[in-house]
Image (cartoon, rainbow, N blue to C red):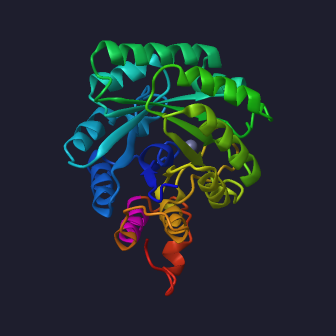
């Protein structure tokens, strides 16, 4: 089994989307550059969506433009629909992550469409990417939100998850990302669903996106690793949340996730000392935000060594 793993920073998107303090474009680019210096090559740098919905991302074109100047960085953006996906294509995003929820109720609340409407728009976006001759230069990914349960709808049937996954996989895409948007997943369920998804994904890479809302985040990472997943989203300092999940804490903390994966014998190519220094900078950039993460408080174990 492959012993390298890719941790992708999503703090600048998922992490910042509920934060009231609007970071300057320069600070965001400083953050991005620092994580590149740590060894990150895949970062979700911003989200293209109406600025009135989330003012934090009003500078999305500028953040993306600055990110595109950083060598060795593959800059991803999240989009909620076809219109903003086309805008991201226009601005030269290297990877477009299209979010749709398996839960009908969550999709309606989040992007005001039925899941089928979102699926159709995603298909149109992939077609448009291909028409523009960008199939080999712009990656198309889809994030299936509420894969492991929904705070609005409750249970999300696993056959519905597989049904939606099968539909998106027919489009010829570069990644399918299974997201526990509201922190309902548990390790047994996570292992089962990822095994099923990996069995139908063929050559399409499969990624995992966990929130640590109920303390299951890192346990779910272990379960996904055991199922064969080698791509994980994480957010520096565990920043983040979901507007439709009350009390939702953020994503799994990047620094803790990297440390865990290295302890599992998987090579992340991340410099943990540099990452913890960047994590300290985040305290300064967002002094009023509660941040999570154990590793910064405790430091690395004396017995720990990187893969
Ligand atoms: Zn998320």
Question: Where 188 sits versus 63, above or below?
Answer: below
Residue 21 in view? no
Residue in the foreground of this view, choosing between 30 and 225:
225
Residue 253 percent across, percent down from the top left: 53, 60
Residue 306 percent across, percent down from the top left: 43, 74
In the image, taking residue 61 as reference, residue 127 lies left or right, namely: right
Residue at (52, 73) in percent of width and height: 295
Q: Which residue lies most toward the bottom here?
A: 302
Residue in the foreground of this view, choosing between 16 and 269:
269
In the image, taking residue 188 as reference, residue 169 lies left or right, namely: left
Residue 234 in view? yes
Residue 112 percent across, percent down from the top left: 60, 19
The boundaries of the magenta stretch are 275-285
Residue at (72, 56) in percent of width and height: 214
Q: The C terminus lies in which quarter of the figure?
A: bottom left
Residue 221 is drawn in which quadrant?
A: bottom right
Q: Which residue lies most toward the right here?
A: 155
Q: Main secondary structure of the magenta part?
A: helix
Q: Quadrant holding ligand 1?
A: top right
């Amino acid at each position: 089994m492959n012993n390298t793993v890719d941790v992708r920073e999503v703090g600048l998107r998922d992490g910042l989307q509920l934060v009231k303090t609007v970071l300057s474009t320069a600070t965001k680019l400083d953050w991005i550059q620092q994580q590149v210096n740590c060894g990150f090559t895949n970062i979700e740098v911003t989200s293209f969506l109406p600025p009135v919905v989330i003012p934090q991302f009003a500078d999305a074109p500028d953040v993306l433009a600055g990110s595109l100047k950083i060598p060795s960085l593959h800059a991803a953006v999240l989009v909620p629909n076809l219109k903003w996906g086309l805008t991201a294509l226009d601005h030269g995003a290297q990877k477009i992550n299209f979010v749709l929820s398996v839960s009908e109720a969550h999709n309606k609340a989040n992007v005001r469409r039925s899941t089928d409407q979102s699926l159709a728009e995603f298909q149109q976006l992939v077609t448009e990417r291909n028409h523009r001759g960008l199939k080999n230069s712009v990656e198309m990914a889809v994030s299936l939100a509420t894969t492991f349960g929904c705070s609005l709808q409750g249970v999300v049937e696993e056959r519905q998850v597989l049904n939606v996954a099968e539909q998106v996989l027919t489009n010829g895409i570069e990644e399918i990302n299974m997201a526990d948007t509201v922190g309902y997943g548990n390790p047994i369920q996570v292992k089962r669903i990822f095994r099923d998804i990996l069995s139908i994904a063929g050559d399409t890479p499969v990624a995992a996106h966990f929130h640590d809302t109920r303390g299951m985040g890192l346990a779910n990472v272990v379960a996904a690793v055991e199922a064969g997943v080698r791509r994980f989203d994480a957010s520096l300092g565990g920043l983040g949340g979901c507007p439709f999940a009350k009390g939702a804490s953020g994503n799994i903390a990047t620094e803790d996730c990297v440390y865990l994966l290295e302890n599992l014998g998987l090579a992340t190519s991340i410099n943990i000392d540099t990452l913890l220094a960047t994590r300290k900078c985040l305290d300064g950039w967002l002094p009023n935000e509660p941040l999570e993460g154990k590793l910064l408080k405790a430091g690395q174990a004396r017995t720990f060594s990187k893969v």
